[in-house]
Amino acid sequence: MSPVVVGVDGSEESLRAVEWAAGEAQRRRQPLQILHAFSSPLVGAALALAPAAPPEDDLWHAAESTMATALARAQAVAPDIEVVTTALPHTEPVPVLLQHSREAELLVVGSRGLGEVASLLLGSVGTRLGTKAACPVVIVRGPVVARGPVVVGIADPGESDDLLAFALAHAARTASPVVLAHVSAEGSAGESSPLPESDLARWRERFPGVRIDQESLIGQPGKTLMHAASRASLLVVGSHHHNEISALIHHSVSQNVLHHASCPVAVIPVQR
């Protein structure tokens, strides 16, 4: 059975990600795998920024403490789930998480687990995973709202099936309504149009207990979508990019909301 995989580094946001992942694993009735990795560059950066940093043995003990804390948070949220913990010292976090994404049902991380300075030095883990992971990625930002709609950002109705399948299944498990947000830039109204009723009927038949509404919005796509999801429990967007630099250059909506949304963001790989 494919696990829900969560990366943890001991930060409060990564522990919130553990809680979110544990709840999702319990809802899906799938195992939870907790991964912790720290690499030599991270150790070097820590030493450069803090000359009094602990020696390697203390770093190992800190890693064990991080895993124990993460496990306790997971079990507090979902005491009956199967949990597999894996500590991976001296290993780059992103390659390990990407490797596990090939077998995972879902990959979950905190949004700023490494902190502002390390994020600037090493790049955003969430950004790199969102552009390269083989499975859906959820980036948990701030306190998790238990109740609220699942908002789906629809840029192209023809590419919405993967997003809708993920969003509606999650909504069914959490008894949440779904809002399909069709965002068009100013001066280009009509480029993003609501799904035809025939398509909606198909999804309503598949998920009869989920309320589905549609909204057509005008504005800068990233900001407009974030406003629409300001009270959401989850925002679902698609990603076509497989290269983080390309994503940043093209200011993709998924990268915009990943860095600024106030709720957890699910980034779903979409094939053109």
Image (tube, rainbow, N blue to C red):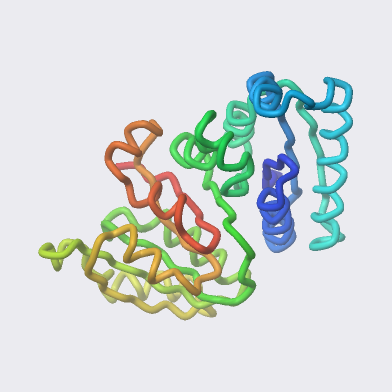
Q: Residue at x 64, y 72 (%)?
A: 146
- Snapshot quadrant of residue 213: bottom left
Q: Quadrant of the N terminus?
A: top right
Q: How many marks?
A: 0
Is 12 rendered above or below residue 133?
Answer: below
107 lies left or right of 181 = right
Is 206 rendered above or below residue 79?
Answer: below
Is 161 rendered above or below residue 36?
Answer: below
Residue lying at the far left of the rendered structure: 187
Where does residue 107 sit, x and y in percent of width and height? 60, 45
150 lies left or right of 144 = left
Where does residue 104 sit, x and y in percent of width and height? 63, 41
Q: Quadrant of the C terminus?
A: top left
Residue lying at the far front of the rendered structure: 51
Q: Residue at x 16, y 65 (%)?
A: 186
Q: Nearer the viewer, residue 146 or 9?
A: 9
Where does residue 125 sit, x and y in percent of width and height? 55, 37
Q: Nearer the viewer, residue 158 or 188?
A: 188
Q: Nearer the viewer, residue 52 or 62?
A: 52
Q: Residue at x 26, y 71 (%)?
A: 217
Is 67 rendered above or below residue 231?
Answer: above
212 lies left or right of 265 = left
Q: Residue at x 27, y 40 (%)?
A: 250
Where does residue 76 sit, x and y in percent of width and height? 85, 61
- Snapshot quadrant of residue 194: bottom left
